[in-house]
Amino acid sequence: MRKTLFVLGMIALIALYAYSCAGPMVITEAPPPTKSEIKPPRPGPKAVWIDGYWKWNNHMYVWNSGHWERNPRGNWVPGYHKRQGRGHVWVAGHWTKR
């Protein structure tokens, strides 16, 4: 019995690991047009505006509003939806060193 439970547990762990390494999720439905947002006042001289974006939540796109973020001494590279095969993949925004 113990051996069977151990083997089943190992199979579950391997399956979870394989699922997490599967790569980006390709969505066949194109994202809606980007919303225009009114930026609130800049909270400080080093704040950088991060644009809002559409995020897929397993059955529909949901808008994530833009926000100000303190600049960690780098440049912000905005995220974007990339056409891939017959669908779209979200490429997340990130900070780069100057």
Image: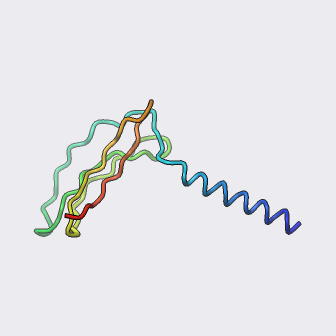
Q: Where does the image place residue 11, in percent across and percent down from the top left?
A: 73, 57
Q: Taking 8 as reference, is 78 above or below it? A: above
Name the quadrant containing residue 10: bottom right
- Compare residues 61 and 10 and report the one nearer the observer: 10
Q: Residue at x 14, y 68 (%)?
A: 46
Left/right placement of residue 72 relative to residue 20 reads left
Task: Say left or right for 24 vs 13.
Answer: left
**Which residue is situated farthest in the top direction here?**
86
Q: Is residue 38 left or right of residue 15?
A: left
Q: Position of residue 72 (x, y in %)?
A: 23, 69
- In front: 89, or 63? 89
Residue closer to the observer: 20 or 45: 20
Seen in the picture, residue 30 relative to 73 is either above or below; the reply is above
- At horizontal 20% and vertical 60% (from top left) the residue drawn is 75
Which of the image's four quarters has the N terminus? bottom right
Q: Residue furthest left?
A: 45
| Callout count | 0
Outermost residue on the right side: it is 1
Residue at point 41% right, 35% down? 84
In the image, what residue occupies the spot 28% across and 52% down? 65
Residue 57 coordinates in the image, percent (x, y): 46, 47
Q: Which quadrant holds the C terminus?
A: bottom left
